[in-house]
Amino acid sequence: MQKIKKVKFLDLSVNDQKERLELHNVLERCLDHGQFVMGHEIENLESNLSKFVGRKHCISVSSGTDAIYLALKALNIGEGDEIITTPLSWIATANAIAMTSAEPVFCDIEKDLNIDPNSIENLITARTKAIVSVDYTGNLADYDKLQEIAKSRNLLLIQDGSQSFGSSYKGKMCGSFGLISGISHNPMKVFGGLGEIGSIYTEDDEIADRLKILRYNGTVNKEFLKYKSLNFRADALQAAFLNLRLATLPGKLKKRKKIAESYSKAFSDICEIPSETKNSKRVFYTYTIQSDERDALMRHLSENNIETKIQHPLLMSQQKPYSNCISNCPNALKIVKRILCLPIHESLDQDDVDYVIEKVREFFR
Ligand SMILES: Cc1ncc(COP(=O)(O)O)c(C=O)c1O
């Protein structure tokens, strides 16, 4: 098949004319009421997301990074604490930990790219205070095991569900695991705004109150300072856009799932295809394959006008500022050299998908 058009890895332009018009209408509505900070757009979003996720409290914030940072701060995590996390995530996870002055400790991952619960125990010390799990690529971690470890070792569990909003485990939605969950809704995410925004979830009333105070310069009623903090409030415009996009999320997830099914059917005999945690329903933030011939495959696809991405080429533990942290991740060190993300987004048509399949198979032939 000849292909002149590039198959983009990501397409953030809004091509659906109905959605474009609706987004314009939302903007008009906001221009009319003029409430750009907090107010009813934020209240609607928090109420809708708390229902969607099935958790008592949703607190919107300025980004996913801030969501994880505030979750840790709300649990009084700071200097002298060690936080066990996966080495394979966007660097925001480790940065959020480090910016509280706690130290990230990197455990190992499994073949499914998520935290390996069996690698946690050996890294627990008297200073270990929490586990931050990341649901990588759209696949939820093994929360039965993680919750068991957290309970038996008296550790706090925090979920970084930034890549997996919309997925579920034993019927419970992403956002409802651990004491607190933090989610990114940046535009790259399947459920993303037109700019930076994030959300935090908890069942606990006291934690929710603390999060709301920390979100706005540590103040109560704007005037009385309770904690030292900064401004992490979400943008009301982004909240309004997200509110609109919540209705189209199931359709987007379905489209991505269909593409993933076509890929998996075509690639299961030639490379490692994405897996799905037992008893869970995953989403596809990325479609990440694993192959020893990753670099050559990436070159072949690029020569054929197909954009791919290595997400991420370095483990967080390999980044210079974290290279002295405690880490024990032999599997992750091997896996990070084998991962490659193929294009999977709503703007791909059947021709694009067939073309990617043809070129990947051609390479392995
Ligand atoms: C796993 C993970 N955690 C945290 C973040 C940070 O989110 P944000 O970009 O909204 O700050 C991201 C974003 O890419 C992410 O993928």
Image (cartoon, rainbow, N blue to C red):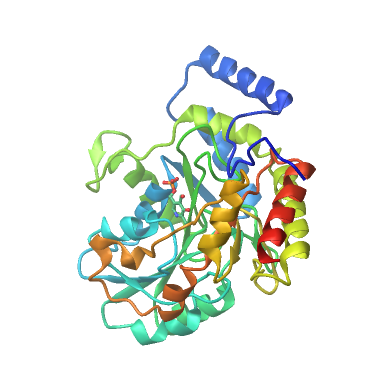
Q: Position of residue 226 (x, y in %)?
A: 25, 46
Quick check: 80 left or right of 117?
left
Q: Position of residue 79 (x, y in %)?
A: 20, 65
Residue 100 visible? The answer is yes
Q: Position of residue 40 (x, y in %)?
A: 53, 29
Which residue is drawn at the image coordinates 28% and 40% (left, top)? 217
Displayed quadrant of residue 266: bottom right
In this orientation, which residue lies closer to the viewer: 22 or 298? 298
Q: Quadrant of the C terminus?
A: bottom right
Which residue is drawn at the image coordinates 28% and 76% (left, top)? 326
Q: How many marks?
A: 0
Displayed quadrant of residue 360: bottom right
51 w.r.t. 347: above or below: below
Q: Position of residue 193 (x, y in %)?
A: 54, 36
Which residue is drawn at the image coordinates 58% and 15% (left, top)? 28
In this orientation, which residue lies closer to the viewer: 51 or 141? 141
123 w.r.t. 201: above or below: below
17 w.r.t. 263: above or below: above
Q: Quadrant of the N terminus?
A: top right
Which residue is drawn at the image coordinates 62% and 18% (left, top)? 24
Which residue lies most toward the top here?
Answer: 32
Residue 135 visible? The answer is no
Quick check: 195 left or right of 267?
left
